[in-house]
Structure formats: structure tokens, C-alpha cells
Amino acid sequence: RYKEMIKKVFSFLAGKASYRMRYRKLWIELVPSAYEAETLQGELVRCIGNLEDEAKRNGNMNWDSEDRRAVNFLKKHLPDPDVFSEEERKRIKECVKTIGDAGSFKNNEVTDSEEELKYVLNRVVDYCERKPELIYIEEEQEYVGHY
């Protein structure tokens, strides 16, 4: 029943609302009020939302290990060859790297990542709409690697 509801949300939203509106609906449906999401789609939505919030609200001044984990999760799962072209995957990887660099103040420089955050957020929406069958995350699959 839950899967059918999510499929309806995806099909209703696809192409009919702005990316921001579709993203908000995905957040409401897929992201729990606390902790990580149970699904790959929900966790992608949660990760980019948290990174965007950290950048916009805090200027990345509270960047921590959870933000690095979010970057790693996006880096690992978003550039899916079943969803995106080679060119899109390359751009996703570049944007996620820039977001990570901005948060960690790489080389002690402040990097603006607003454009990259928007691009990745839009690709997360695309991912969810192109893969509406929810993918449940196994514990060992959640966060792998280091930034």
C-alpha cells in the first residue's frame, strides 16, 4: 500500500510542478522526522536537503562528519548509470565534489556551492521519479567511504 502511494506521488508530480515543489513532496513522503531514511530515495532526498540547509543557513560553519557522510552517500548512489547519461553522471560527481570542498573549506578557501546544490537537488528529484520502486537500504550499504 505504501509503495502504491509513493508511485502515485511520483507520477502525479513528474513534470507538473517545479523541482523545488516536487522535492518538498518527496521530503514529506520519504524522510523521517529523525535519523536516516529507510529507502535509498529518501536518503538521497535527506542528504541533499541537509547539505543545502547547512550551506544556506549556517554558511557551512557547522560542517561535520554527518555532512561528509551525506556527500559520500550522494557520491556513491546518485550517479546511477541506469538513470543518468555519462555526461549527467560526470556533472553530478563534479557538483558533489564542489559541495564537499565548500563544506570542508578545502585549502582554507570559501567556495560558493549554491549552483551545485541546486543541480544535485534537481538530479535527486529526477532519480526518485525515474526509480519510483522504493529501494530499501541495508545497514552495511548506508554510509561507505570517507570524503
Image: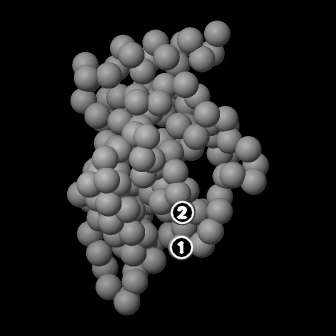
* C-alpha distance separating marks 2 and 1: 6 Å
Is the residue marked by circle 1 packed among few (<14), some (14-19), or many (20+) residues within 10 Å? some
Above or below, comparing residue 85 to residue 135 in the picture: below
Is 81 left, or right, of 138 in this rendering? left
Q: Position of residue 30 (x, y in %)?
A: 55, 31
Above or below, comparing residue 48 to residue 7 in the picture: below
- Tags 2 and 1 in contact by the CB under 8 Å rule? yes
The quarter of the picture where the N terminus appears is top right
Above or below, comparing residue 68 to residue 11 in the picture: below
Q: Residue at x 75, y 54 (%)?
A: 140
Across the whole image, how many numbered discs are drawn on residues? 2
Q: Which residue is mark 2?
A: 72
Residue 1 appears in the figure = yes
Report the amino acid beneath label 1: Tyr
Q: Position of residue 92 (x, y in %)?
A: 34, 56
Q: Which residue is mark 1?
A: 147
Q: Residue at x 52, y 51 (%)?
A: 77
Q: Position of residue 12 (x, y in %)?
A: 36, 14
Is 108 left, or right, of 73 in this rendering? left
Is 119 left, or right, of 46 in this rendering? left
| Residue located farthest toward the right when viewing the structure as drawn | 139
Residue 32 appears in the figure = no
Q: Residue at x 50, y 69 (%)?
A: 62
Is the residue marked by circle 2 packed among few (<14), some (14-19), or many (20+) residues within 10 Å? many
Q: Residue at x 24, y 29 (%)?
A: 18
Quarter location, residue 51: bottom left
